[in-house]
Image: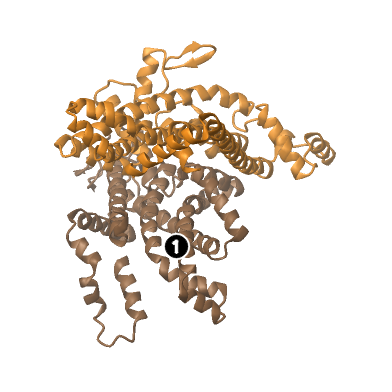
Amino acid sequence: MDNQSSNAVEAQSEPNVVSAPSTLQRWAQSDIWYSYKRSPIIIVSSITFTLLIFGAVFSALLSPYTPFDPSSLNLMNGFTKPLSTNEFTGDYFLLGTDDQGRDVFSTILFGLRISLFVGVVAVLFAMSLGVVLGLISGYIGGWIDGVIMRIADIQMTFPSIMVAMLLYGIGKGLIPPDLRDEMAIWVLIISIGLSEWVQFARTVRGATMVEREKEYIQAGRLIGLSRWTIMLRHILPNVTGPILVIATISLALAIIAEATLSFLGVGAPKTEPSLGTLINVGRQYILSGEWWILLFPSLTLLALALSVNLFGDWLRDVLNPKLR
Amino acid sequence: MDSQNHASISTLVKKTYQSGALASDFRLACKMFAFIIRRLGQALLVLMAVGFVSFAMFKFMGDPVENMLGQEATAADRAELEERLGLNDPIVVQYVRYFQRALTGDFGVSYRVGLPVGEVILERLPATLELAFLSGVIAISLGFILGVYTAIRRDGYLANFIMTASLIGVSLPTFLIGVFLIWLFAVKLGWLPSFGRGETRSLFGVDLAILTWNGFKSMILPAVTLGLYQMTLIMRLVRAEMLEVLRTDYIRFAKARGLSQRSVNFGHAMKNTLVPVITVTGLQFGSIVAFAIITESVFQWPGVGLLFINAVSFVDIPVMSAYLLLVAVIFVTVNLIVDMLYYAIDPRLSVRSN
């Protein structure tokens, strides 16, 4: 998907070429597509990821029950086994139900939606912050660069998951207690985003420092373009490759961080459970034998994390063959 | 890479003979000293910055006056208490005072349990440290053995299987591994306890679970969970280093001399994989302490990590800020020691800086 759009941008930026092949043709001849066709693992993981996104986006349409509408819940449905009909109510559940009679399949779809939402928005936040700070750091340099990079260094000393937990605690302390559940998702997004910006900033800074010395930037400076025009219109498009790779890898990290925090009870609230919250609920029933409440959300999270991870690794290798 | 090393070592030897061993030693010691001072300065800077964040949390987020005074306090009471706590002093003065008190172990009183934070943390610290220690031992020994094995049997089925499994293991979230281990070893097989610390025995006034059989058994699962990620990391590193070393000339010569395969692998090659392993292992100790938060929560292990996560969910600011400072001290100390060890172990570094 991303490859297609980046190619489309390239195609648009060269309107003067007379017999330019169409976007589709260009894409079919690209190295990325060639490599994609030859790696079955990547095909499988990209299909898995697409299916999971589809499930998350259309969770309201796909889920057979409405698990978070208290009026539709029936406690008699509690602990129904997978692939079976409840003996009291006659309702059928594909993946069974949890203690409160919620359909596990439906809760997974809604949980997936929250996990993906938090992950994607957190990465977008981290990316915008990191890219802007990286551009400033790399292009302007001087003491601003020093300050930004020292902050980055100090933050790098700590594992990002710990930083996210700490920021979540601070964020929670800053908002009034009666709003905490409502705002929890946004606090989560901001804390994960703030814990992941460093990688973007460092990479963009490095790339910017290389670009800054090139002639087209000097030419831009000569005709009097402003700093921000040069940074955003001229340098940024030339450093998108590494940003894309880091964004994919960060997405996997952010999804895992979100699941971990929610699992530990310092993330998504019980009223809007993400996959991590669902796994935490399921964990309470492994001793009593209701394995499906734990297993299916865990498998979903696994599929999500693995597919994004593998895709990110592959993308890094294709876009940057030197690193292999 | 390798020929370069030989060249630099030989230049070192030459230089030592030329300038007299004593002068060279003196110069080396001076360099070392300057290096240590510089690293100490950086470490202090990091501590000051983290200390400031921790102080700012303590200062601006918790309202100690609100907590200490009752409902019917008057404005005069409030002003009097603020004066007594020194809250009217300039920020810098308060910051210095915060540091002074932190140095004596005084971090205020926990909002949640109502006890002094320093005391609570100190009581919980042995549990985390022994867990980190055992998981470090597991990670290093297993990681090293598997790393050497996968390098020697590069194309073997078992070695390939281990490599693939480790790749999947790295992308799994820690808590999921913990839950899976509980399911397998505690629920299905019933071999090991699923949570808690078991019995402890006192050694020099410190309660340790590792000293009792029961306590050791409850430590195995959390320690494995905690060490697994570090183990895969060490394994991959040792494998890569080992493969690199096995390609070098001196190994080829050793083989040509007719030394046995075992003596080449373990006597000559393995030694040279040690330096990077020590560095990474040292640096990973810090992240073991941090990841202990997750593991301790999964296994309800009563260490500082569990304390921290409870503090986060109850917004217990004094505990959070003290924990932040504690982790910063551990990280900085470990990094410093590793840097110095690295400098001491690898003679190439001191030569390169000439």
Q: Colour of chain B?
A: orange
Pick the residue in front: A98 or B207.
B207
Q: Quadrant of residue B27?
A: top right
Pick the residue in front: B259 or A60.
B259
* Label 1 secondary element: helix
Pick the residue in front: B152 or A240.
B152
Residue drawn at x 51%, y 30% as measured from the top left: B21
- The image shows residue A160, relative to residue B25, as above or below, that is below
Q: Colour of chain A?
A: brown
- The image shows residue A228, relative to residue A72, as above or below, that is below
> Residue under mark 1: which chain is it in?
A
Total numbered badges shown on the rendered structure: 1
Q: Quadrant of residue B4?
A: top left
Q: Is residue B114 visible?
A: no
Disc 1 target residue? A207
Pick the residue in front: A30 or A179.
A30
Q: Position of residue A208 (x, y in %)?
A: 47, 64
- The type of residue carrying mark 1 is Ala
- The image shows residue A69, relative to residue B182, as above or below, that is below
- The image shows residue A307, relative to residue A18, as above or below, that is above
The N terminus of chain A appears in which quarter of the rendering? bottom left
Q: Position of residue B94 (x, y in %)?
A: 74, 39
Structural crowding at the residue carrying mark 1, measured as other residues with C-alpha within 10 Å and reported as few (<14), some (14–19) or many (≥20)? many
Residue drawn at x 34%, y 75% as measured from the top left: A10
